[in-house]
Amino acid sequence: MSALGVPRRWSEDVDGIRWLPRLIDKARMSSGGELAAYLFGHSPIDRGLMTGLGVTTATFAAIVADSPDDAAVLTALRARGFDEARVRRWSARLPKPYQIIITMIDLDEGHTRPTRFERAWIGAFRTIEGGVMGLVRLVSPAP
């Protein structure tokens, strides 16, 4: 996990699978009670990857809890069996289908420099972020 309770950036990968390190970090943050406003299993990107991996949020969390590092998580996922070519295609297309979400994440976490308009938007969003994410968790339960 990167510093200050922020999961790794979407573009980081484990053996060529993007978003997997971020999802691993969010699973560890969730189990440690440190998820804050982040979503784990609720976001369309989390769901896209977990669907490809053939796991539910609870199953993924259990695999992460039983694995000391990223390589062990991937080994456990491979042992369960998933269509790795399909997941790699999904990863290669990232961030295109999720461009708005990825842009918001990068701006919020400081990976990209915001314009004046984006700075104002980010400031406004941060004041309501916890409530919005709580609502997402209620209306869109993690699979």
Image (spheres, grey):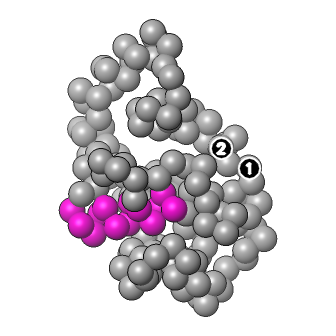
Q: Residue at x 60, y 49 (%)?
A: 11
Q: Residue furthest front?
A: 3
What's the CA distance linking mark 1 and mark 2? 6 Å
Secondary-structure class at tag 1: helix
Any part of residue 139 in sight: no
State which quadrant residue 117 falls in. Answer: top left
Residue type at mark 1 is: Arg
Q: Is 114 situated above or below 132?
A: above
In terms of secondary structure, what is the magenta stretch mainly?
Answer: helix
Image quarter where the C terminus lies is: bottom left
Q: Is 117 situated above or below 21?
A: above
Q: Residue furthest top?
A: 116
Q: Nearer the viewer, residue 49 or 26?
A: 26
Q: Nearer the viewer, residue 51 or 19?
A: 19
The residue tagged 1 is 93
Q: Residue at x 41, y 37 (%)?
A: 109
Q: Which residues are magenta?
A: 21-33
Sort mark 2 into few (<14), some (14-19) or many (20+) by Cα contacts within 10 Å.
some
Residue type at mark 2 is: Pro
The residue tagged 2 is 95
Q: Is 6 situated above or below 67?
A: above
